[in-house]
Image (spheres, rainbow, N blue to C red):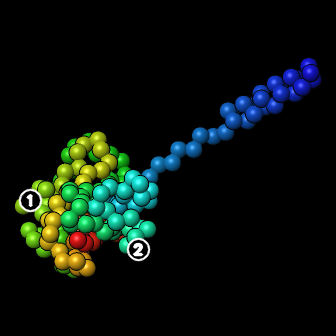
């Protein structure tokens, strides 16, 4: 029994010594500071998917840059804009526009919560903010689908990620 105890003590001390000798790796993003869209609802279990968002299991696949919502059931929809890079020490206004490929009509199929402006504020010391839209209930006929594609324009100090510069919300009844 004494030999087993000594053996376990030796193995424990050897493992602690080996771990303590390893260099600590610090992973730091070294690319340019950019903003990008992200589908923060992607990958959620269907039991946790918010009302009015169609999960992938219904045949309407969500992607990193798109999702399907119901204009009749969704309420306010939030589109995540995230900062890639170090947090900033002051507020930054990020501009966006509605892409010309969009088929949904503002004022008919949806409204922005911050009507009349195409900017969102990324508060100092944070890494994300949201563009909020209110789908208009009853604005689509059964089987009809409209798209709302937003494009980030960025800020003079913060660029836009080329891969995630657009986000499409498909509106369904």
Q: Position of residue 82 (x, y in %)?
A: 32, 54
| Lateral position of residue 98 relative to residue 160, left or right | left
Q: Disc 2 on helix, strand or loop? A: loop
Q: Residues within 10 Å of mark 2 (few under 14, many from 20)?
A: few
User: Residue 115: which disc?
Assistant: 1
Q: Position of residue 74 (x, y in %)?
A: 24, 60
Tell me which corner region of the image, top left, top right, bottom left or bottom right, holds residue 78: bottom left
Q: Residue furthest front?
A: 142
Near-viewer residue (113 or 109): 109
User: What is the spatial separation of the Cα atoms under label 2 and label 1, in whole angstroms?
Assistant: 32 Å
In the rendered structure, the answer to whether residue 79 lies left or right of residue 12 reads left
Residue 170 visible to an observer of this rendering: yes
Q: Earlier in the sequence, mark 2 or mark 1?
A: 2
Mark 2–mark 1 contact, CB under 8 Å?
no
Q: Position of residue 106 (x, y in %)?
A: 11, 70
Look at the picture and state if 151 lies above or below 90: below
Q: Secondary structure at mark 1?
A: loop
The quadrant of the image that shows the C terminus is bottom left
Residue appearing at x 8%, y 59% in the figure: 115
Q: Nearer the viewer, residue 116 or 57?
A: 57
Quadrant housing residue 98: bottom left
Q: Is residue 63 something one can see in this rendering?
A: no
- The residue under the point 92% across, 21% down is 1
Residue sitting nearer the eye, 163 or 133 = 133
Seen at 6% across and 61% down, the residue is 116
Q: Would you name the residue on which mark 2 appears?
A: 59
The residue depicted at 14 percent of the width and 71 percent of the height is 139
The quadrant where residue 88 appears: top left
Say which of marks 2 and 1 sits in front.
2
Q: Residue furthest top?
A: 2
């Amino acid at each position: 029994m004494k030999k087993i105890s000594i053996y376990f003590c030796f193995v424990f001390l050897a493992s602690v010594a080996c771990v303590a000798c390893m260099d600590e790796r610090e992973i730091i993003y070294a690319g340019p500071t950019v903003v990008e869209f992200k589908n923060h609802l992607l990958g959620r279990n269907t039991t946790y998917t918010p009302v009015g968002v169609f999960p992938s299991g219904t045949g309407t696949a969500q992607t990193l840059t798109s999702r399907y919502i119901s204009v009749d059931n969704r309420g306010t929809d939030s589109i995540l804009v995230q900062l890639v890079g170090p947090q900033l020490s002051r507020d930054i206004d990020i501009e966006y526009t509605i892409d010309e490929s969009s088929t949904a009509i503002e004022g008919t199929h949806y409204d922005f919560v911050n009507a009349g402006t195409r900017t969102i504020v990324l508060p100092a010391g944070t890494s994300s903010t949201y563009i909020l839209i209110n789908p208009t209930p009853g604005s689509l006929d059964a089987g009809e689908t409209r798209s709302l594609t937003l494009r980030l324009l960025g800020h003079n100090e913060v660029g836009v990620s080329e891969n995630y510069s657009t986000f499409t919300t498909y509106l369904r009844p």
